[in-house]
Image: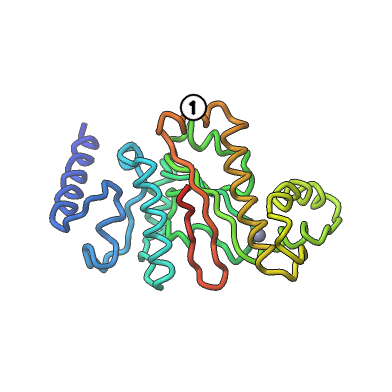
Amino acid sequence: MKNLLNYFALFAVSAAVLLATGCQSPHHRCCAMTGCGNSPVPVSAVSTQASQAAMTPQLALAELQAGNARFVAGKPLVRDFPTQVQATAAGQYPFAVVLSCLDSRQPIEIVLDQGVGDIFSARVAGNVEFACKASGAKLIAVIGHSNCGAIKGAVDGVQLGNLTGLLARIQPAMDAVPPGVQPRTSKNYAFVNQVAEANVRLVMQQIRERSPILRAMLDSGQIGLVGGMYDLATGKVQFYEK
Ligand SMILES: [Zn+2]
């Protein structure tokens, strides 16, 4: 009971801060954002069952966009990671699942400025269903990137053991780029990036087609699905508008 009271007290304080700073978002990060609360205190709050429940697919996308804007501006939130680690040890309530490349230049939590327990980060599509159905994430974001080595390898037909299987999966994306785009080699930056974009759209399509569970959640608006491209040169994620 005491814990419950403490929780409500904490909630009341949070709500008061939200009101005081004029924040509209139910998500906890809002007030620590630059220009909102001007608080020098590191962010120690984490995604909770309540904040996750208050999230919608639209708010989740807005949060990812705001996070990337903070990253690009060189003004990421200051986080108290040890406290976030403790706060998430017993459970997690991430608001989004992000599929991205394993490329070291696209560290996804950093470029989207998210903390411990905020997003599921996947490199392959396997766990997306779990993230949404069982764990309550509200948005699936598929984010490719420019100048991708895996795409370049596929474009040049590299045969490297296990990598060959991965590259075979990129073939449909190559086929989706209009034949007028020439030359179709890894030296052609525009072609490589168009293949990467086509691959993002194909993965989005596969998520819909291969999972009846996710399709139903998408159709009912319980979750959202968005694609995007991360620019290695500018640090910006361009989300696709459909
Ligand atoms: Zn890549």
The vertical placement of 6 against 153, above or below, is above
What colour-coding does the image apply?
rainbow
Q: Judge left or right: residue 216 versus residue 30.
A: right
The vertical placement of 140 against 183, above or below, is above
Q: Judge left or right: residue 28 versus residue 228.
A: left
Residue 15 seen in render: yes
Amino acid at the residue labelled 1: Ala
Q: Which of the 4 image quadrants contains residue 4?
A: top left
Q: Residue furthest front?
A: 180
Tell which of 231 and 51 is nearer to you: 231
Q: Position of residue 16 (x, y in %)?
A: 14, 50
Q: Position of residue 9 (x, y in %)?
A: 17, 43
Q: Position of residue 49 (x, y in %)?
A: 35, 38
Tell which of 195 and 72 is nearer to you: 195
- Reading the image, the residue beneath label 1 is 216
Q: Which of the 4 image quadrants contains residue 187?
A: bottom right
Element marked by disc 1: helix
Q: Position of residue 181 (x, y in %)?
A: 70, 62
Residue 90 seen in render: no
Which quadrant would the N terminus be assigned to in this image?
A: top left
Residue occupying image coordinates x 31% and y 55% = 29
Badge 1 local density, few (<14 within 10 Å), some, or many (20+)? few
Q: Judge left or right: residue 119 versus residue 35.
A: right
Residue occupying image coordinates x 54% and y 34% = 130
Q: Judge left or right: residue 159 versus residue 72.
A: right
Tell me the quadrant of ligand 1. Answer: bottom right
Tell which of 189 and 225 is nearer to you: 189
Residue occupying image coordinates x 41% and y 54% = 64
Is the C-beta of the residue carrying label 1 under 8 Å from the nearest atom of ligand 1? no
Q: How many marks?
A: 1
Tell which of 190 and 88 is nearer to you: 190
